[in-house]
Amino acid sequence: MDTTEKAVLPDESVGGGRGSNEKRPGLSDRKAESVQGGGGGGDVENGMAHADAVKGDGDDVPVLRGLSILDRFLVVWIVLAMAIGILLGNFVDSVGPSLQKGKFVGVSVPIAVGLLVMMYPILCKVRYETLHLLLRHRQLWIQILVSFVLNWILAPLLMVGLAWAFLPDRPDLREGLIYVGIARCIAMVLIWNDLANGDPEYCAVLVAFNSILQIVLFAPFAIFYIRIVSGNRNDPDANYTLVARSVAAFLGAAVLTRLLLRPLLGESNYQKHFIRYISPFSLIGLLYTIIVLFASQGHRVVHSITSVLRVAAPLLVYFITIFSFTVWVCWKCGFGYRVSCTQSFTAASNNFELAIAVVVAVYGAESGQALASTVGPLIEVPVLVALVYVLKAVRRRWKWEG
């Protein structure tokens, strides 16, 4: 077995995480070791949420140690970004329409810019050139199967059930929630996984897997849950082309950058200079995206507060339930912490950008469906930020290795 394959071998990071006194390095640890061996790449991650030292010893290092000012007060910045967005959308009449002008792969240009800036640095770090080696191992396929069941069977069913339970008299809000439930996350999950010290290689594999399935399954799932289950015979136009183009645009830029730029710069320069320079832009992109998203819908959120609260209740139950269930299943199955972290945030995250884009295109920006899909990130962002800290605390309490 060659050195490259050893660097991505998943077996130790997948199993044996529970009840082990010996720390078993996961994929991220091996990546850090190989980069450091190539010329001091240990500083690469400093611009992001945490240093590699924090990643390697998460059980005995305080959560906030090693974080930058931006990361240390992330919850504060996110709340401020949401507040600024809502205030702008509510008190500056021209903001909402201006932010909806122009489209890029079905998403307004300002939001598309934020998504690209947010996703690009994290995806540029993933070693795509060695991901094919992961697919040789049975343990990875087990993780893919677990992810499929959680993301494409249990999560949509849970959202549909909660939507009917909480909103039996509001089919418009119910349908908006269903769209959120079937749109599996391929963007912000990278942020949550990184902040919680999850495994970036596994996250990249699951993001790629869900991206492909999103292209194939989003439209038929929308038709099934909206037309058949909910009884709405108006055919939702969730076309394959829109979904496929959005996935290709947001993922393709980073993949091409790594595959083309890394050979030109060399591994050491790529990690020490390029990655280190672009890393801080992920969280900046996240905050920008939140401001733009809430500014574009701030007026509706404020003036439909009753509907917002009714939609918020099932969303809150959904995120906490699916996340807690996934953590428990991974713990009981003996999966390592890093892989379990990745599975949990992948299952609990939703592609609300896609849901909003499709719902607005189908039902219009002033519809109840659009309002419900807009409330999605209003609840998801602060809840998942809180769950990052909860999962880190659980890791220390359970002495969860791997």
Image: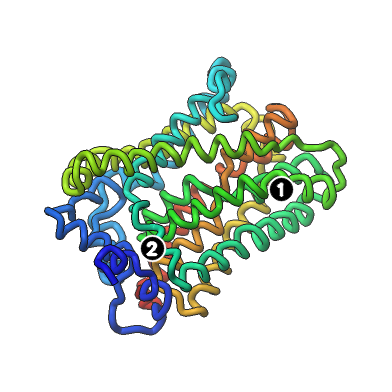
Q: Is 127 in front, or is 171?
A: 127
Determine the CA span between mark 2 and mark 1.
36 Å
Relative to residue 2, is residue 387 depicted above or below? Answer: above
**Are there few (<14), some (14-19), or many (20+) residues within 10 Å of tag 1?**
many
The residue positioned farthest toward the top in the image shown: 94
Mark 1 is on which residue type? Ile
Horizontal and vertical percent for residue 334?
46, 79
Instruction: Give the labeled residue for mark 1.
Output: 178
Mark number, residue 133: 2
Q: Residue furthest left?
A: 39
Examine the rendered structure and indicate whether residue 249 appears above or below residue 139: above
SS under mark 1: helix
> Residue 286: which numbered mark, if any?
none
Packing grade of label 2 (10 A; few <14, some 14-19, many >=20) is: some
Which of the two residues, 331 or 31, is positioned nearer the viewer here? Answer: 31
Q: Amino acid at mark 2?
A: Leu
